[in-house]
Image (tube, rainbow, N blue to C red):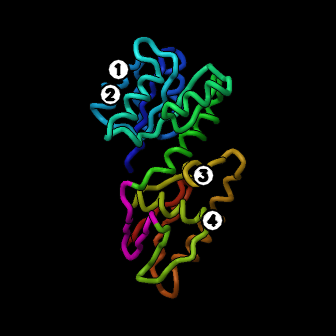
Amino acid sequence: MNKADLLVVEDDPALSRLIGYNLEKQGYAVRVVGDGEAALEQVRQKRPDLLLLDWMLPGFSGLEVCRQLRGQPKTATLPIVMLSARGEETDTIRGLDTGADDYLVKPFSMEALFARVKAMLRRLPPADKTLRFDTLVMDRVSHKVERSGRLLALGPTEYRLLEFFMLNPGKVFSREELLKHAWERSSFVELRTVDVHIRRLRQTLNEGDEQDLIRTVRARGYALDLPQG
């Protein structure tokens, strides 16, 4: 599975380390730089999926970085979340008018940052628009799933579970891992809920004598896999 590539531009070393560490724990690939010039160079080398940009930076300010990126065709649509201690409404408007897609006022919780990141990344078109596994075909644009040509009626949670499985075929995931990836607010969901949705997913996937593609691994979790033997 390809990790979303995030570029964090923050001149406070302690805060940049904290943000980078927590985002990596969420499963993202993270690059961290401390000034505007380094940020522009990193973007030139490799366009990130999302830019987390501090306003007050040495050299180029975050606003100037944003202006420059918006003025170039390759980065005109790059998702940008501006981070700033400037919390007045006029500051927020200025940041958004300069080209930021979202504005997060410091100090902020990691949960608030994660929510912003997830929301921004949801707007990105999937890198792989069609996923395939055995007789399963998932269209990630229309959100339609078929098995052997049969259209499957999946609920949103079952869809997210299946998408995660199809991005990682054969890999065993614990209930905790599935909870993290299929539920955005996993702290409010019990682990046994995962079993309920796995059962629903199985019921939808399997019809008649079709092979069960969801493998249960005792004391470990579940995997999307072909039956052995």
Residue 207 in the figure: left or right of residue 35 = right
Q: Is residue 62 magenta?
A: no
| Secondary structure state at the residue bearing disc 3 | helix
Query: 205 left or right of 43?
Result: right
Measuring from the top left, give residue 227's x and y in whole percent.
Answer: 41, 72
- In-front residue for pair 114/67: 67
Residue located at (35% from left, 20% from top):
38
Query: Mark 4 or 2 closer to N-term?
Result: 2
Question: Residue, x 38% and y 32% (percent of image)?
Answer: 69
Which of label 4 and label 2 is nearer to you?
Answer: 2
Mark 1 surroundings within 10 Å by alpha-carbon count, few (fewer than 14), some (14 through 19), many (20 or more)? some
Q: Amino acid at mark 3?
A: Leu
Q: Crowding at label 3, few (<14), some or many (≥20) Cα neighbours within 10 Å?
A: many
Residue type at numbered disc 2:
Gln
The residue indicated by pointer 2 is 42
Question: Relative to 177, does residue 14 appear above or below in the rendering?
Answer: above
Instruction: List the residue tagged with mark 4.
Output: 197
Q: CA distance from mark 3 to mark 4?
A: 11 Å
In the rendered structure, which amino acid carries the disc numbered 1? Ala
Per the model, the C-alpha gap separating discs 3 and 2 is: 33 Å
Does the stretch in magenta take in 139? yes
Q: Which residue is mark 3?
A: 179
- Mark 4 vs 1, N-terminal side: 1
